[in-house]
Amino acid sequence: MHLDLRELGYERSYDRVTAFARQWKVDQLERVNSASKLTH
């Protein structure tokens, strides 16, 4: 992913990309869990 972003002009570090990806995953899990609570 980092290499793909670099090709698009992204200049920040690999660590920033992984931090974003980790937080995105947490956010997605929270959204899924919230949605499933509403359906029960």
Image: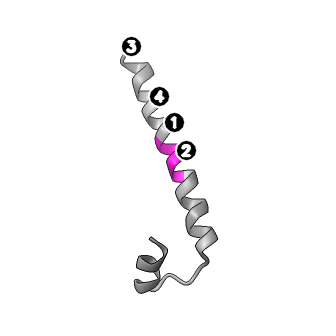
Measuring 41% from the left and 28% from the top, which residue is drawn there?
A: 35
Q: Amino acid at mark 1?
A: Glu
For the residues marked 3 and 4, what is the alpha-carbon distance in whole angstroms? 11 Å
Instruction: Please name the residue that numbered disc 3 is placed on.
Output: 40
Measuring 41% from the left and 85% from the top, which residue is drawn there?
A: 7
Instruction: Please name the residue that numbered disc 4 is placed on.
Output: 34
- Observer-side mark, 4 or 2, equals 2
Q: Which of the marked residues, 4 or 2, is nearer the chain's N terminus?
A: 2
For the residues marked 4 and 2, what is the alpha-carbon distance in whole angstroms? 12 Å
- Element assignment for label 4: helix
For the residues marked 1 and 2, what is the alpha-carbon distance in whole angstroms? 6 Å
- Element assignment for label 3: loop
Q: Quadrant of residue 32?
A: top left
- Residue 27 colored in magenta in the image: yes
For the residues marked 3 and 1, what is the alpha-carbon distance in whole angstroms? 16 Å
Measuring 40% from the left and 24% from the top, which residue is drawn there?
A: 36
29 left or right of 40? right
Q: Main secondary structure of the magenta part?
A: helix
Instruction: Please name the residue that numbered disc 2 is placed on.
Output: 26
Vertical relation: 36 (above or below) 25:
above
Disc 1 and disc 2 in contact, CB within 8 angstroms: yes
Vertical relation: 38 (above or below) 3:
above
Disc 2 and disc 3 in contact, CB within 8 angstroms: no
Instruction: Please name the residue that numbered disc 1 is placed on.
Output: 30
For the residues marked 4 and 1, what is the alpha-carbon distance in whole angstroms? 6 Å
Within 10 Å of disc 4 (Cα), the crowding (few <14, some 14-19, many 20+) is few
